[in-house]
Image (cartoon, rainbow, N blue to C red):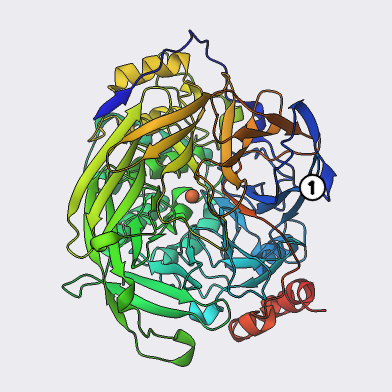
Amino acid sequence: MSEQNQTSNTSHYRPVPESVMTASRSELNNVELNILDGKLPEDISGHVFVIAPVGSVDSGGLPYVDGTPIFNGDGMIYRFDFDKPESARVTTKIAKTPDYYADLATRPGSKYEKYRFRNLGMGRVSLSLGLRNQLSTAFLAMKFSPEESDRLLLNLDGGRPYEIDPQTLETVTPVGSNQEWRAQAETPLKFTFEPVLSTAHPVFDPNTKEVFTVNYGRSVGNILQAIPLIDDLDQIPEEIDELLERLAEFVRVEYIQDFLQIFFQFSDNLLQFYVNLFAKIAGVDVDNFVYLIRWDGKGDLERWRVVLPDKTPVKIEQTMHQIGMSQDYVILMDTAFQFGLEQVINNPVPNKKGVDQTIQAFLGRPQSPNTTLYIIPRRQLKKGQYPLRNDLEVEVVAQKVVIPLETVHFLVDYENPDNQIILHLAHISAWDGAQWIRNYDKSPYPPHNPVEPRLHGMITNALDISRMGRYRVDADSGKVITSQKIYDSRCTWGIGYYAYRDLSTTTIPNRLENIYWTSLGLWKELISDSVFQLYKDYKYRAVPTEELLRLADTGIPAQLYRIYTSDESLKIGDRYEFPNGYMVNSAQFIPRGDIQGDSTDGYIFCAVLSGIGNEIWIFDAQDLASGPLCQLSHPSLDFGFTIHTAWLAEIAPRNASYHIGVRQDYQDIVKQRSKDIQELFEQEIYPHFEG
Ligand SMILES: [Fe+2]
């Protein structure tokens, strides 16, 4: 493994910027951004879309006061327009699904408050209605015919994708009706909004005009059977809470393996409840399923059940945050990001520190240190099952590949000569994006003070240096032919977002030669003792834990850098180190010129957080090192921790005909519910989508 070093200036630690923990829910309309510094390039063009979670209907934006992770929030869509000379404007809108309106109508104090939603870990849940689909993670740009204007999907890990109108930013239609998606696990609770697992990063092939995504389920047992009890647990006496807190310390410090035995020493009902819960999680193996879904932009969803060569079903252990595609293959991945129904039990009783701490001590587990891939030949995808038509299930066989070091984001070259695929993997070593700073967390530095309350709910730091990997894999045998890996002592701490030059909906590059990445950096305030314990014995550790703590004490700033990748070399070609105390998110390539352009010909847009506030920075993609060409901001632009992006050359009102009406989608489910829930839909949900 090679390392590229850069001499750095002596730096002083600066705290995590306040602005990352705040976000406004106010929707903006065509607000002209102020140029703080530099000049907007004359040939910058098109529209950049950014998505960010901005709190819930009853939080008034961010910060949360109760330590809820900041990633649990409604998606706010930001569109930055660069279509007029010397002007950049922003328009924003919250993604409003039917369950958003259900959330709004069931707020505390409302007529329907008994159905209210609560933040439970990374999910927002109503024990009567089900899980919110917050549409807060990533876009997919699509165009299926020349007559159609460019289309945009909004996606997340835990729910169906929805199409939005790029012009009005309205949430228009789910892709696939409720009947076409299968819930994560069958529960006896009859949720109206079922928990559905998909991918935040589906793919679109502009050559064949196909979208691929996934729908999967995972073994968590019938845990939800027990959940109605949780309402009663709101009344947990303080003593039990304290007892649980102490128990959690004991479990963590003494590394007792047989947790259940300890629990059985107590006869309290509450503890018995958790014993049952854990036993179920450990012992029940419900149906694991993975469907690969194909969609043509207009018709019903078509799907295949993914199985291994021995016909056993593919079993996803974590998530499928991203999928990849080449000319002849679709690549699925078990990604290093733990999100799902388990989140509900990860934090079942908000504001009860002891309960949360105990469950974290039990269930908190490091993610797998390896990357598992499933490669599906597209030639097998002849005719699948249309779930709406009562077709029989159709199987497709995937080749399994395991590569050391975990991954959450990856890209694939479109061309696959000799059936060999090129994978670009961002190995986020010892870093789980679904871990956050808990309100009981302590610093790993003596004297182990509690973490700062202002950071409760913030993502934790990577606990080893990330690596960039490039692999050539024989798609049919699954054999890894070549493997290149690098890391950089400044650039690759917590690899975050990627960007590369494509022309969005019309062309896809055959090969990725230059890929831009951001990194979070290293922040001592974002290392909690509980996560430190989870990852200190990380299998592929490159930086010893003592060194990690020493480096974090001074801090390593966020970075934006370009990786040049070829068979011969994998290296950092250009880099920019942000000032201390800054964070960078949501990198997006804005191409310059035409289809033939070089893979560095354009600009890099990114969202920057500082101690002062939120800014948009524009870099020349051919010269990151010189710093931003232009910095933009506005007092009303308050976005917090933004996630993924998309770029469209032009926007026009959506003119596609695909549409699933909300009544048509929900009426069969709602008629089996109580009169109250039927009334909730008639009065508070359907009217927003009809007329
Ligand atoms: Fe992502």
Element marked by disc 1: loop
Nearest the viewer among 433 and 307 is 307
Question: Looking at the image, is 334 positioned above or below residue 529?
Answer: below
The quarter of the picture where residue 552 lies is: top left
Q: Is residue 435 visible?
A: no
- Report whether 169 appears left or right of 460: right
Residue where numbered disc 1 is placed: 26
Residue lying at 17% horizontally and 56% vertically, measured from the top left:
479
Residue lying at 59% horizontally and 69% vertically, measured from the top left:
143
Residue lying at 83% horizontally and 44% vertically, measured from the top left:
31
- Report whether 114 appears left or right of 90: left
**Image location (x, y in percent) of residue 368:** 28, 46
Question: Looking at the image, is 139 positioned above or below residue 445?
Answer: below
In this view, the residue farthest toward the front is: 596
**Image location (x, y in percent) of residue 70:** 59, 42
Question: Looking at the image, is 581 positioned above or below residue 426?
Answer: above
Question: Looking at the image, is 519 positioned above or below residue 646?
Answer: above
**Image location (x, y in percent) of residue 394:** 32, 83
- Report whether 150 appears left or right of 293: right
Nearest the viewer among 48 and 114 is 48
**Image location (x, y in percent) of residue 691:** 83, 79
Residue lying at 39% horizontally and 72% vertically, measured from the top left:
292
Q: How many numbered markers are drawn?
A: 1
Q: Amino acid at mark 1?
A: Ser
Q: Is residue 479 visible?
A: yes
